[in-house]
Every structure is written in C-alpha cells, then in structure tokens.
C-alpha cells in the first residue's frame, strides 16, 4: 500500500502580541522544560513534528526535543522516549516568521494515540507563539527534564506553545477533514482533558473509515477581521491549504463577525460581506481539490456573558440572513445545519438548554456531540 505524509494533528497559532486580553495570556520560557500532550488522529509508521516562530520578533532556539507515549498527567510511558532532530541536529533555531519541520521519527501511531512532546528551552524564548485554549493540560518544569519519566515539580499550563502540528506517514487514500472555525470548533464549553471537542468526536465517528480530523479552531476568531488570531480569510491558506493530505474542510465562522462588533463598539458587518468571504474560501478550497462544507451560524440569544452588545436585534437579523444564504448556497458541497441541530425549538434564537454550556454561546459536551453527528451526516463521500 502506498504511503505518504498526512496531517494528524494541528494547533492554529495565535500571536503573543494580540492587543486584546485573553483568559490564558502569552508567556515565554527560559531554562525550562515544556511538556505538551497531544492526541493524534490517524494511523502512521513514522511522524514528523512542526514547530513555529511565526509571530516571533527574534530567532527561536530550542535546545532539545523528545517525543514519547503519554501515560498520565506529566508522566510518559517508559521505553517510548525518542529524540526529535532537525537536519540531524538536536538543537533547532527557527527564524522569525518561519516554521521548522523535524526529521522523520520512527514511532507507530494509531487513532487516538496520545503523545507527549518535551522541549528544553535553555535560552530565553521571548513571548511564544501559542494556542490559548488547548483544553489539554501541559506542564512546565525547571531545567532540562525532557527525558524524565516523571516530570519534576510540574507546573500546569493551559495553552499550547510553539507546536503547530504533527504529520504521520500513513495510507495515501486516507480522508483528512480540516475543521476550520472559532471557539465552537476549538471546543470552548466542553470538558477540558476529555477530548470532547466536536473535531475529537467527529474523529471517533469517522475512525472506521480511516479518516483523520484536524482541529483548526481559534477561540474568538473572525472571518473578516484580525484580533483573536488572524482573520479566517488570511489564515485559511496557512492552516488548511498547506496541511498535507487534506481532502475536506468544514468552515464554521461568522459568529464573532456578527456578535463582536456590537460588544467592541465597532460598525456592524453586512451579511453580504460575510457571504463574499465565505464564498472565497470555498473557491480556494476547490482549487486545491479540497471539498468544502459549511456550517450555519449557531444560536446565541441571551449571550450577555460575552459582553454587552453581542446579542442585539441587528446581530440576530444578520445571523438569519447569513443562515438563509448558507442553506441555499451552491458554493459549498454540503451544509452542516448546526443552527437547526442546536437550537431550542421553543426559542429558535437560543441554544437548546441540553446543549448549553451556560454562557448561551458555547455548546457543552452533548452539544459538541450533536455538532459532530451533524457534520458527519453532511460530509460528502
């Protein structure tokens, strides 16, 4: 059977220089070991690690990196610890604005493989590229502890740093679904550490077909405006089109474009502008022979916790206009009607109470399962 490199894990990076305050702020590292836990999607006989310094202002040097199977918390499985090299060297320096791809590592992976990437940062890194909502606890330890089975003095960290992806060498005919979106895709509202984000649940549903699912959500992300990550129309090429092996993309964006302007005292966006942006993404996906699927914008009535101005009559009107276009559009191959799947039938502008994490925007674990099922049913063969 022919094998090739395909993406098995992705973490969409955010600049540490974002102007808006975040729940999980950026940070840097110096003479510390960072241990990060990731779950892969897909089967492979070898893997390669991707590290980014996309938003760094200076070169980033990482002294040593190792990968191992995860046991629990900050502990790795003994005997699985393996060196990761770059051009044969243990140390790697990544220029500003660049990404480094490791040499192949001989390590067999299966669906739902949990790996640990341990990196030693001898020199001060400065503010690190990161993904604020990892929803999977990582750990920090003083000094060089990358080979320790039990990480000494582990300090929990709730974001992911530097790591942009992992590819595996596996079957050439495997479907790879890129879930591209905002906090709904990122998994905010689901239980941390349980892999109940909708892309995780979709991956489990698609495992019998041998498919992999990539989570490319960024909490707060917008289609047409920067802040909380680069705008979707900009980062689409980097995050989706350059990921090896992607066959399908599920676009779930627009909620923050509709709600955040009122909260941030900005002019509201027109549905026509969002339609143009979403149509452009479908066109770019097709040029790369990727099948595009689009999701309707989910309900958010009563979302006062997001801030005053998020849920307004204007915002609700724009959501209805956009969803009307999404349901009837011919730019995408299929529609995942998340609005219909998640709404309260007695109050259609609101999330169903059974699916509401409590803030009236983000679905809980049951809501994430409903999203995964809706997306799975909509995916074209």
Image: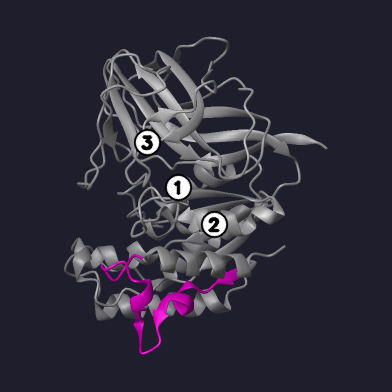
Is 341 one of the magenta-colored residues?
Answer: yes
Labels in figure, total: 3
Q: Nearer the viewer, residue 187 or 276?
A: 187
- Give the quarter of the image for residue 12: top left
Report the span colored magenta: 334-362
Structural distance between the alpha carbons of marks 3 and 1? 36 Å
Disc nearer the start of the sequence (3/1): 3
Q: Nearer the viewer, mark 3 or mark 1?
A: 3
Question: Along the horizontal axis of the image, is 9 left or right of 135?
Answer: right
| Mark 3 touches mark 2? (CB < 8 Å) | no
Its colouring scheme is one colour
Quarter of the figure with residue 146: top left
Q: Residue at (54%, 16%) from the top-left corner?
A: 86
- Residue 281 got which mark? 2
Residue 335 x, y percent position in the rendering: 57, 71
Dot 1: element: helix
Residue drawn 23% across the image and 47% down it: 22
Q: Is 339 a magenta residue? A: yes
Instruction: Name the residue tied to disc 3.
Output: 73
Q: Nearer the viewer, residue 130 or 115?
A: 115
Residue 24 picture location, percent across and down = 25, 43
Quick one: SS at disc 3? loop
- Decide which of tag 3 and tag 2 comes sooner along the chain: 3
Quadrant of the rendered image containing residue 221: bottom left
Q: For mark 1, what is the residue?
A: 234
Residue at 58%, 27% in the rendered image: 48
Q: Nearer the viewer, residue 254 or 304?
A: 304
Position in image of residue 375 (x %, y %): 56, 66
Q: Residue furthest right?
A: 1
Q: Give the spatial CA distance, label 2 vs label 1.
A: 10 Å
Looking at the image, residue 134 lies above or below residue 56: below
Label 2 crowd bin: few (<14), some (14–19), many (20+), radius 10 Å: many
């Amino acid at each position: 059977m022919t094998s090739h490199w395909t993406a098995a894990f992705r973490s969409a990076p955010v600049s540490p220089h974002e102007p808006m305050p975040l729940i999980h702020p950026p940070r840097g590292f110096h003479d510390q070991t960072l241990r990060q836990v990731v779950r892969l999607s897909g089967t492979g006989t070898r893997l390669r690690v991707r590290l980014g310094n996309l938003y760094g202002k200076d070169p980033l040097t990482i002294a040593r990196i190792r990968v191992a199977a995860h046991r629990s918390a900050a502990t790795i499985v003994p005997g699985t610890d393996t060196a990761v090299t770059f051009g044969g060297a243990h140390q790697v320096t990544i220029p500003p604005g660049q990404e480094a791809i490791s040499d192949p590592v001989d390590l067999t992976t299966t669906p739902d493989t949990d790996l640990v990437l341990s990196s030693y940062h001898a020199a001060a890194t400065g503010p690190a590229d990161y993904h604020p909502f990892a929803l999977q606890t990582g750990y920090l330890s003083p000094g060089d502890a990358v080979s320790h089975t039990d990480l000494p003095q582990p300090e929990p960290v709730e974001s992911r740093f530097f790591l942009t992806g992992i590819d595996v060498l596996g079957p050439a005919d495997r479907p790879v679904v890129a879930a591209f979106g905002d906090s709904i895709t990122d998994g905010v509202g689901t239980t941390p550490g349980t892999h109940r984000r909708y892309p995780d649940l979709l991956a489990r549903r698609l495992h019998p077909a041998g498919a992999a699912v990539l989570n490319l959500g960024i909490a707060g992300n917008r289609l047409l405006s920067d802040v909380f990550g680069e705008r979707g129309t900009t980062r689409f090429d980097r995050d989706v089109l350059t990921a090896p092996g992607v066959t399908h993309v599920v676009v779930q964006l627009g909620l923050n474009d509709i709600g955040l302007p009122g909260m941030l005292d900005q002019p509201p966006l027109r549905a026509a502008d969002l339609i143009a942006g979403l149509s452009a993404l479908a066109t770019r996906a097709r040029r790369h022979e990727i099948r595009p699927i689009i999701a309707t914008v989910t309900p958010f009535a009563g979302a006062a916790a997001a801030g005053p101005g998020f849920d307004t009559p204007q915002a609700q009107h724009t959501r209805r206009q956009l969803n009307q276009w999404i349901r009837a559009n011919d730019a995408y191959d299929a529609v995942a009607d998340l609005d219909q799947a998640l709404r309260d039938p007695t109050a259609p502008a609101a999330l169903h109470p059974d699916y509401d994490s409590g803030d009236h925007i983000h679905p809980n674990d049951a809501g994430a399962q409903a999203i995964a099922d809706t997306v799975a049913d909509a995916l074209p063969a």
